[in-house]
Amino acid sequence: MDIATLIGIVGGFGLIAATIVMGGNAAGFIDPPSIVVVFGGTFASCFIMFPMGVVLKAFKIALKGFFAKSEDPKIMIDQIVALAETARKESLVALEKVAIDDEYLKKGVILVADGTDGDLVRSIMEFEIDAMKKRHFQGQAVMKGMGAMAPAFGMIGTLIGLVQMLSNLSDPDAIGPAMAVALLTTLYGSILANVIFLPLAKKLEERSIEEASYMEIMVEGVVAIQKGEHPSIVKEKLQAFLSPGLRDATA
Amino acid sequence: MDIATLIGIVGGFGLIAATIVMGGNAAGFIDPPSIVVVFGGTFASCFIMFPMGVVLKAFKIALKGFFAKSEDPKIMIDQIVALAETARKESLVALEKVAIDDEYLKKGVILVADGTDGDLVRSIMEFEIDAMKKRHFQGQAVMKGMGAMAPAFGMIGTLIGLVQMLSNLSDPDAIGPAMAVALLTTLYGSILANVIFLPLAKKLEERSIEEASYMEIMVEGVVAIQKGEHPSIVKEKLQAFLSPGLRDATA
Amino acid sequence: MDIATLIGIVGGFGLIAATIVMGGNAAGFIDPPSIVVVFGGTFASCFIMFPMGVVLKAFKIALKGFFAKSEDPKIMIDQIVALAETARKESLVALEKVAIDDEYLKKGVILVADGTDGDLVRSIMEFEIDAMKKRHFQGQAVMKGMGAMAPAFGMIGTLIGLVQMLSNLSDPDAIGPAMAVALLTTLYGSILANVIFLPLAKKLEERSIEEASYMEIMVEGVVAIQKGEHPSIVKEKLQAFLSPGLRDATA
Amino acid sequence: MDIATLIGIVGGFGLIAATIVMGGNAAGFIDPPSIVVVFGGTFASCFIMFPMGVVLKAFKIALKGFFAKSEDPKIMIDQIVALAETARKESLVALEKVAIDDEYLKKGVILVADGTDGDLVRSIMEFEIDAMKKRHFQGQAVMKGMGAMAPAFGMIGTLIGLVQMLSNLSDPDAIGPAMAVALLTTLYGSILANVIFLPLAKKLEERSIEEASYMEIMVEGVVAIQKGEHPSIVKEKLQAFLSPGLRDATA
Amino acid sequence: MDIATLIGIVGGFGLIAATIVMGGNAAGFIDPPSIVVVFGGTFASCFIMFPMGVVLKAFKIALKGFFAKSEDPKIMIDQIVALAETARKESLVALEKVAIDDEYLKKGVILVADGTDGDLVRSIMEFEIDAMKKRHFQGQAVMKGMGAMAPAFGMIGTLIGLVQMLSNLSDPDAIGPAMAVALLTTLYGSILANVIFLPLAKKLEERSIEEASYMEIMVEGVVAIQKGEHPSIVKEKLQAFLSPGLRDATA
């Protein structure tokens, strides 16, 4: 699991909780109807904004993208170089028998072992990258939409609370607590947007860039294998995807 | 009807209504003059922003796009493959007698049956996609415009109410209720924008993308039929439009 | 005159006026110094933002674009088809004697009658379209600039009023009315921006698109006439600019 | 000097001053520490945002662009046509002796007189246009940055004032004036941004477009002279840069 | 060290501190829990937004970009011209023995001395420019993200404080100080965003442009040396990167 995400979520909520508890009246910060109107309203708007299927898929994508651990491109490059050696020493057909964990790489290698043309292999593999980006982009759109709606429903809840409080000022002692409750929805909306939805949308964007780069390594590697390029050339090519500090000395 | 839209609208308004009713003074939330100034002002601005015809058309498009059920691209692909088989076994002319429900597909098939050139068929069909996108884009522009104007008129209403209340502070008991009424327009504007107009604008955008993709399937299918391609090739081509999980095994 | 603009302006101001009058103290909403600081300040900023000539021209363009009635492209197409028939039956030179109301079309037709080359006719006519778009774009920029400045000066006026009120709290009865007056500039700025400047900027954008499309019909028509194309082909070509529902059956 | 800028600045500050004086307590609006924190803070942020040299240059450019009078393109065209006539009647070399006020035009003409190739003349001259645009763009960036920072420091100042006031509510008579002073920084920030920095950024943008167009006239003119084109052709070409109403009748 | 950055930071914080101290109650502005929730929350959100590695790298890049002194392009040009002279008088191989401080230039020169092809040298060197831009862009994204999150957590802190204060209004004397403390988080968030994160993001952008231009000088210079161009031509070429006032007279 991505350790930064864990630190962020635990840290963000922990700090807010600590601030509340230190104030000495933590129970006053939990108001079930306020929770329902902000959470519920945000999800309701989301369903108006996006078709059913998109919303459900977005959450699955978000959770996966949120907690997935980054893959190490160096390990992938080594694996591809090993495949290139096998292909050189034995044959392209021999690749079919190599055990490969990564589903995407496996698909590409089988295409090559089947004797598929290099350009076709590339276009089939790149189609998957585009599809992945599109899925992530939709997930991001849903998260951003909810990040915009949560504070809006927070404000709607606060306005409702203020109108109720102002309509009935007969008991001065009730004014303060009523206004406190009214402000809670704004607080909930603000927390939801800034600790969950907006950072999540951003992380999906970062993940999408990272994953596309990881998949491109595989595309270039598989195409190079299909062309029968020398393993050391394959390695040098793929290392261009790494930042300079991570590269091995040129073979 | 799109079930997500229904859930969203009923859910959004239901939650807001429930919050109000639970506060015990629901009647205080209905103020006809406030309703008139927010709704009316939003529509008035909309008529200044857009030519008459655009506004009226936008609402028709929005309603259609809002409630329309997504078509299933798999069924469309099967239908096109069946047409490709007919064209192969009999002739292109034979397509004229096949019953086709979808108006757009029918138009393309008749063009092909009439012996129209493939490039011309494509350009005529793509012109319709552009026109559809333009219509949806204008609908979106109107919805976004109203989503920006509703809170503005809400604020104008509240300012008017505050000025009236502040000019006449002689009766302290009237201050609270007067301010409650003043806040109502802000509440109305906020609900209109965040539960109706802005999510609607977003859904039109999503629908436009979905519908364009659906129409492109038909364009590619019809052009492939015109070229006399084998039904199994047509199928494989069109399946590229589906996300991997939805595809049939390659024939 | 564009009926939508009329409905919008009368409706928008009417609703605001009605809301104020119903509150029973309409006179309190008119404060000449507040009006002067908001209107004046908005115009002053506008003069800092744009060169003198641009501001004056922008208002002329805005008024024209605001109230101009849309031309009917169908009538224009019929007129061009008639010209194509004259050119076919008689000669290009004969076009010089035909009475043409539209200045832009007339200019193009005279160029053709004078034997100007088709590409040159097109480039001269398209230069005018670009110049029109540029004029409208500058008009829009001025309107948007004022739409941003009006609320800013409204807020400046309110801040001045609040500072004055707070500096002198000795008479409690004067606090309310002083704050009411302070809020008036915010109200004025908000109305100016949302009922006048921002919708006007949007309409200029819409008009610019509409007018460019109308002028492109004339460009394509005049060029087709210059090439001596058959009137029925000219008609079919130009109908591509209309939305499907408005087209005549193909000749 | 650009008369619109003068009207705008005098008008904007004049109206604000008049509003303050009419309120009867003008001295209360001048608070030196508030002025220092808003002005100083805005400049400090600006120095963090941009390298030293960029900030200093930006102010020089802004002042120049702010007060510079627009040049008349018609006079420039006449001058270039006169040069074309000299070149035709005498020779390109003769251009060296003609007195030319505009430094940029002079540089181009000397290049031509020296027998420089037309394409090289164009690329050298266009390099200057790009450099001018880049300078203006940086000036704009600095102005926009300050326009964003001034209200931010205004708000920081107000928050500091409010915290101070709220920490010490023992003297009720001091609350009003303390809050008035707190609001002053917000007022200053708002005036700085909306009367100075943001309109100035906009005017630099407009000036940049205007100046580039003026310089392009010179580029096209000098290149045409280098090619030995007929003065009447040169005139017609350059008039395409003028809006139709300003053009001379074609020679 | 960049003197402007120093002036900005010392000036910005100095002015704020002076304003606070002059108000006479400086201790009231330091509230450790408020500091923790704003700083901590901002960093927590940042960890949710970006993968771990990106955040850590961003701070290193930001610090470097923040304090790095701009290099003088004139000195670099002179150095490259000297190298071009060596290459001319002796040979490309002789370049290997020249002492070069700049790592990037050294790498390029060694490639040339090794007899690498000009296009390959260019593509290897430009790859580094892209990598530098990407690093700076990520640094900017992190700074912008924190600049957006700091005020959000400031507002969350203030809302928590207000709810606590309003829930317990029994002691009127505690209201003012409680509200003062509540406002502190908003103040902290505003200072963090406007004095640190947002200006820093802007400066990284400026630095990135500056550094790319500096590196492009080296690329063009090294490639010119590889082609064996005359030192005076190399100089003239590279001077095109300088603003006109900084150029030497043409050789």
Image (cartoon, coloured by chain):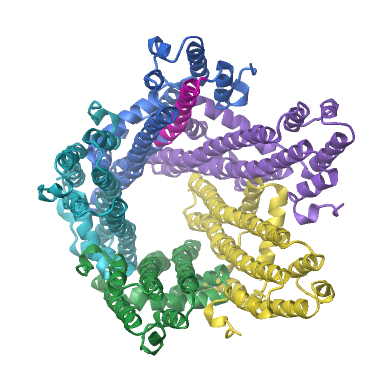
Chain colours: A cyan, B green, C yellow, D purple, E blue
Q: Position of residue B18 (x, y in %)?
A: 25, 73
Q: Quadrant of residue C234?
A: bottom right
Residue E225: in magenta span: yes
Q: Position of residue B41 (x, y in %)?
A: 51, 71
Magenta stretch, overall SS: helix
Question: At 18% across and 63% down in the image, what residue appears?
Answer: A32
Depth check, front residue: D245 or A218: A218
Q: Seen from this angle, which residue lies furthest front?
A: A90
Whether residue E35 can be seen here: no
- D248 vs B211, left or right, is right
Specify the quadrant that holds the C terminus of chain A: top left
- Where in the figure is residue E121, as x and y percent of width and height? 41, 27
Viewer-side residue, E10 vs E175: E10
Magenta stretch: give its range. Answer: E200-228
**Residue at (82, 27) in percent of width and height:** D93
- Residue A214: quarter of image: top left
Rendered view: D76 above or below A175: above
A173 part of magenta stretch:
no
Q: Quadrant of the N terminus of chain A?
A: top left
Q: Is residue E93 visible?
A: yes
Left or right: where B11 falls relative to E98: left
Asked if E124 appears above or below A64 in the picture, the reply is above
**Which of the two residues, B117 or A3, is positioned nearer the viewer here?**
B117
Work out whether residue E46 or residue E80 is closer to the camera in this orientation and state it: E80
Q: Position of residue A7 (x, y in %)?
A: 17, 41
